Amino acid sequence: MIQIQQLTGGYDGKPVVKDLSFSIERGKITGIIGPNGSGKTTLMKMMNGMLSPQSGEVLIKGKPISSYSAKELAKIIAVLPQHAESSFDFTVHEVVALGRYPFYKGLLKQSTQKDEEMVQRSMEFTGVQHFAEKSIQSLSGGERQRVLLAKALAQEPEILLLDEPTNHLDLSYQMKLMDLLKDWVQGCQLTVVAILHDLNIASLYCDQVLLLDDGKEKAVGKPGDIMDSILLEGVYDTKLSRQEHPQKPKPLIALVPSEREEQKKIEDIELQTTSEAMVFRSPYFLKTMSSALIGGGFCWANTFVNRHVDKNYNYDDAHSEYEAYLHSLPVNPNETIGMMTAARLEDAGMVSIEKEGIKILAAATAGTSNAVDAAQSWQRKDDTVAIGTINIWLFIEGELTDEAFVQAMMTAIEAKSSALRDYGIKDPITGTIATGTSTDSLCIASTQEGERMRYAGTITPIGKAIGHTVYQTVGKAIENYRKRMAQT
């Protein structure tokens, strides 16, 4: 649809865009990203014919853009500029109707019924039809942006060029605008080229992304390839972090502030214990991965609650009940990892180690009455879930990658299973060695400062420390449990 061939151009003889070559397919959304001054708007002006290139050329549908008349080009390309001011007091309807001007016929350039239908359709599409008779001067910046988009769409273009289309729009309308553009692209085979400052909008909605740096192509390709933190850091000169979207197969880019807090140490974590709860409080937020009822998955937390409940605890909505309990402590559920256990908290085992620069604080509560062998659990006919009796907490000083968090959980689970094996804990149904209990839970919490630990498998230094502490901690909890049971 569009071919850019060795394109160079700028102002006053000075090139801003330098030797660019790439192509844009029909019916796709292409995003142009890059820091201020990288040549995005200059490139857009050459793509719509407003600026002649110094060398190279822009081909539209296989023909040089210079070979089209202004009217011919207006029937193919519509443009939504970054800044578009109107000094005339036109109504919204009149502004949108200007988009049909290239199609007006006759000496008097009169509109037809089809023209009006396209005006109405474009206003409905962008959600501006309810203020069609208002003056454009009376609208907010975001409302004007939508009116100008409606004007561009009223042209029925094959190509839509957008310079920061989400500028002035609040979050809701940003998403609605991009969703509607995506629908238009898919339904009408519209080709969209958009300059975007929001990297996450580019990642979520674009089929192709062009990354510019100092007027040159730094990279072009699928969003999953371009949204690389190292690649982007080199262009934007700022610390970035890539994460995966929780619901879409798209990467998200997060800013990482440069300011540093005071050093985080696990010895600063305080423990408060009652018969009802073990509460670990950290003066800092820790990055966590857990299977907990409250705060499960990845999150950041500064409070960690291991709550004792009766073995007959039963609520249809345990999550809401637990949140209400946290509020009563008082604890903010949004900053908390919360587990439940029927095990007695006084039986808890705790181990703290510091070895070869690795610091770990581990705690566990363990009861074994509902022990299960995971490999044989399929033989059980009773699916009733009892309250979990082995809860493990691991606080680590250092920086874990996401894969290290996963590996740390695997290592901890293997060490727990080894402890159950060595203490002879059996599944009462199958008679085989148990690997855990029916609803065990585990939390890995890391300061995310200090030594970077990319892996946490069983033979890595951090993995060895995790295996050792979990084995010892679970073992102590089992011993304490057995001692108390022997005394009753």
Image (spheres, rainbow, N blue to C red):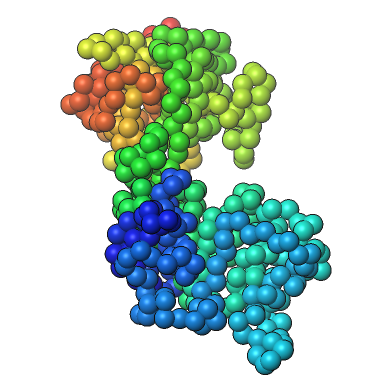
The relative height of residue 411 versus residue 229 in the rendered view (above or below) is above
Left or right: residue 119 versus residue 405 is right
Indicate the position of residue 322 as horizontal and vertical percent values.
Answer: 60, 29
Quarter location, residue 21? bottom left
In this rendered view, identify the residue nearer to me: 321 or 371.
321
The structure residue drawn at horizontal position 30% and vertical position 36%, both measured from the top left corner, is 403
Task: Provide residue 206's location: percent of width, then percent of height.
Answer: 44, 60
| Residue 155 appears in the picture as rendered | yes
Outermost residue on the left side: it is 459
Q: In the rendered image, which quarter contains the N terminus?
A: bottom left
> What residue lies at 55% left-to-right and 81% top-to-bottom?
71
Query: Residue at horizontal 70%, vertical 76%?
Result: 97
Q: Residue 116: where, in percent of width, then height? A: 71, 82
- Residue 61's place in the image compared with 450, above or below, is below
Residue situated furthest front in the rendering: 12
Residue 181 falls in image quadrant: bottom right
Residue situated in front as seen by the camera: 337 or 243:
243
Of residues 249 and 73, the one nearer the viewer is 73
- Residue at the spot 44% in from the left edge and 73% down from the top edge: 27
Q: Quadrant of residue 118?
A: bottom right
Res 291 seen here: no
State the count of labels: 0
In this view, which residue lies farthest toward the top?
Answer: 487
